[in-house]
Image: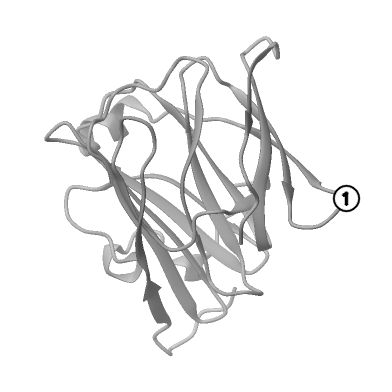
Amino acid sequence: MRASRQEPSRRFVTGVIPPIAVCLFVAALFSVSATADSARTSNPSCHFGSRHYWGVGPNYARVDKGAFAGNCWTLWMKGGHQKRCYNLGIAGDQRVAGARGCDLRAWPPRASGWRQVLGATTGRQGGMVVMQITGRRVRYLRTRAGPGRPQRRIHQPTKRISPGEARRAHLRRNFRFAVARSPTPLCIRHVVAFDRHRARIGRFQRPCKL
């Protein structure tokens, strides 16, 4: 992704998803998925450290980032006031898109649970990222994604925020997460969760909507 002097256009769309026992306010597109690629790829034009570029407010700590197929993405989190808030962003093709949301009750997820939280895309033909929250036992996700057939298979490990990130974000380390990436829009249809021994501990299904 080449650096440009032109300021990328920005797009933040708001909406609401009501998961069980949680009122989650989110931005951007919700029924999304992405491939598991290397999140360690770095690009000097990605502006990973710029809160202004990614539209991130104060008190957020960056917990993940990466680059893929000409796109850059970041994930920021913050806690406090019994909430857990997220800011997910993706930049590509001179556009920056974002998704923001808060769990109004930052309870730990069920140990073997999984939940799609929010996602963002730069356009109908652009890159897409989707954030998922899991319980602490979930170490690996195997996903089938659409639309169309054959369904795409995605394999991805989960992550836990570091002690330093937890301190900066005022969060408890009582959850794990994954950010899946794709060069084109996708939607998650089926997820199987595995523990650290690769034993299956959960199976989840959801409608595929773009």
Answer above or below: position of 180 versus 84: below
What amino acid type is highlighted by mark number 1? Pro
Q: Residue at x 28, y 30 (%)?
A: 166
Q: Nearer the viewer, residue 67 or 109?
A: 109
Residue 206, horizontal then vertical, whole percent? 61, 40
Q: Residue at x 26, y 29 (%)?
A: 106
Q: Residue at x 23, y 31 (%)?
A: 105
Task: Identify the residue under disc 1.
Answer: 150
Lateral position of residue 151 relative to residue 8, left or right: right
Lateral position of residue 137 relative to residue 198, left or right: left
Q: Is residue 138 visible?
A: yes
Name the residue furthest right.
Answer: 150
Residue 127, horizontal then vertical, whole percent? 61, 66
Answer above or below: position of 138 versus 167: above
Lateral position of residue 31 relative to residue 100, left or right: right
Lateral position of residue 11 relative to residue 198, left or right: left
Q: How is the image coloured?
A: one colour
For the C terminus, the image quarter is bottom right
